[in-house]
């Protein structure tokens, strides 16, 4: 005979009922959260689409630049009122100004040859983490190259897709066309939709040895400057015996200039001792932190080119300081002009 009070005998059933209700409401809450997230994502996507349509129709000329003091140190905290803007020596009214890196389009250009393949794969997460330093509307693309460039991941905000772009097939070594790939990377920005106010960045991983390009380095640099694209070059040099010791093979002519003449930076990773160690580990976090810091220390100013300023031909754009201490400060522009085909009147 069961001497347990009736109220206590009912408790297991009540507990099961309460657990069932709790599970039901938890599932319902999860469904509502997923629905809200999906709706928000769709709304954001629609907003971006509408916004892009407007921006495509706006002929916005943007000029990224930095301000440095007499010692070469970056100067932050400046406002639009501190600058004036000129197109072919005619003053124009700025319609866009941003400090830092509110919106960045970042293309990773990966040398898929065997000498750099393993290092690039190891550094995938470190490389993609640099996006966390930029605004939420920033996007990323991945291009690989050997003899020819291949855009393996078009511009996206999906980091999972970008990760797949760092998977490099282990193929037999072939010829390498760095400057052909650099030119293709510059053109990928215009091919993937116009976002004039973006900072356009290429991060190039390579050993620096070009033996297949039809494009000259100067051509890629000229087009990059015209499009406002800056190269940050990460050189992973090859080493060879020379006079009884290992020495780095010098890169192809123009390789360093890709960075120096487009407003980026040139980094060298690795040394002779690591080149002999098949298990050597590389830490590129300082490199990517330096890239992020450099972009955060830049300004971007822009204006809508009117018919009066859009005469055919090359336009020189100049950013000048208006502040009283301009004798102590210097503007270094990362884009100095653009080519105009003129407008129909």
Image: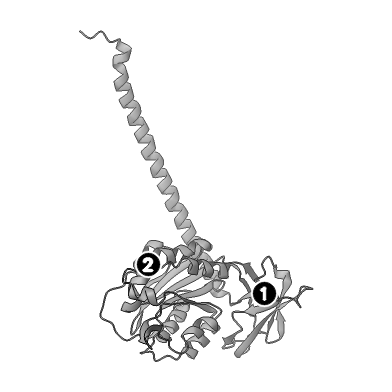
Residue 121 picture quarter: bottom left
* Direction from residue 32 to residue 14 in the image, left or right: left
Q: Nearer the viewer, residue 197 or 122?
A: 122
Task: Tell me, yes or no, if residue 74 can be seen here.
Answer: yes
Task: Tell which tag, 1 or 2, sits nearer the viewer.
Answer: 2
Residue 236 picture quarter: bottom left
Graded by Cα atoms within 10 Å as few (under 14), some (14 to 19) or many (20 or more), the crowding at tag 2 reads: few
Q: Nearer the viewer, residue 41 or 216?
A: 216
Callout 2: helix, strand or loop? loop
Residue position marked by numbered label 2 in the rendering = 281
Q: Position of residue 124 (x, y in %)?
A: 39, 66
Find the residue positioned furthest to the right: 324
Q: Position of residue 181 (x, y in %)?
A: 40, 82
Which residue is pictured at 58% across the width and 67% down the height?
A: 296
Question: Which quadrant, please, contains the C terminus?
Answer: bottom right
- For the image shown, how many numbered marks are present on the structure? 2
Answer above or below: position of 224 versus 81: below
Q: Position of residue 208 (x, y in %)?
A: 41, 83
Task: Tell me, yes or no, if residue 112 can be seen here.
Answer: no
Identify the image's colour scheme: rainbow, by chain, secondary structure or one colour: one colour
Query: Marks 1 and 2, how far apart in space?
Result: 35 Å
* Direction from residue 227 to residue 89 in the image, left or right: right
Callout 1: helix, strand or loop? strand
Question: Which quadrant, please, contains the N terminus?
Answer: top left
Residue 68, which numbered label? 1
Which residue is pictured at 47% across the width and 80% down the height?
A: 186
Answer above or below: position of 165 versus 41: below
Q: Nearer the viewer, residue 67 or 25?
A: 67
Residue 58 picture quarter: bottom right
Graded by Cα atoms within 10 Å as few (under 14), some (14 to 19) or many (20 or more), the crowding at tag 1 reads: some
């Amino acid at each position: 005979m069961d001497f347990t009070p009736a109220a206590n005998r009912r408790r297991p059933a009540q507990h099961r009922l309460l657990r069932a209700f709790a599970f039901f409401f938890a599932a319902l809450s999860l469904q509502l959260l997923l629905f809200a997230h999906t709706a928000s994502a769709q709304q954001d996507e629609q907003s971006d689409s509408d916004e892009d349509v407007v921006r495509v129709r706006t002929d916005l000329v943007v000029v990224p630049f930095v301000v440095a003091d007499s010692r070469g140190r970056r100067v932050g905290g400046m406002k639009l009122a501190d600058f004036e803007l000129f197109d072919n020596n005619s003053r124009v009214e700025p319609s866009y100004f941003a400090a830092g890196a509110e919106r960045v389009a970042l293309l990773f250009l990966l040398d898929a040859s065997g000498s750099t393949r393993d290092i690039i794969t190891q550094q995938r997460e470190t490389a993609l983490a640099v996006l966390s330093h930029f605004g939420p509307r920033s996007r990323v693309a991945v291009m690989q190259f050997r003899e020819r460039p291949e855009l393996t991941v078009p511009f996206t905000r999906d980091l999972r897709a970008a990760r797949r772009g760092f998977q490099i097939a282990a193929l037999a070594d072939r010829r390498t066309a760095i400057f052909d790939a650099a030119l293709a990377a510059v053109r990928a920005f215009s091919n993937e939709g116009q976002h004039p106010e973006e900072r356009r960045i290429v991060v190039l991983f390579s050993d620096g040895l070009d033996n297949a390009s039809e494009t000259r380095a100067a051509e890629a640099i000229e087009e990059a400057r015209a499009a406002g694209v800056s190269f940050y070059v990460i050189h992973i040099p090859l080493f060879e015996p020379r006079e009884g010791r290992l020495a780095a093979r010098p890169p192809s002519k123009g390789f360093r200039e890709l960075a120096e003449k487009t407003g980026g930076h040139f980094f060298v990773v690795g040394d002779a001792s690591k080149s002999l160690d098949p298990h050597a580990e590389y830490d590129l976090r300082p490199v990517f932190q330096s890239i992020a810091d450099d972009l955060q220390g830049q300004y971007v100013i822009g204006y809508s080119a009117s018919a009066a300023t859009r005469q055919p031909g090359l336009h020189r754009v100049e950013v000048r300081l208006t502040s009283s201490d301009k004798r102590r400060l210097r503007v270094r522009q990362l884009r100095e002009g653009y080519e105009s085909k003129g407008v129909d009147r």
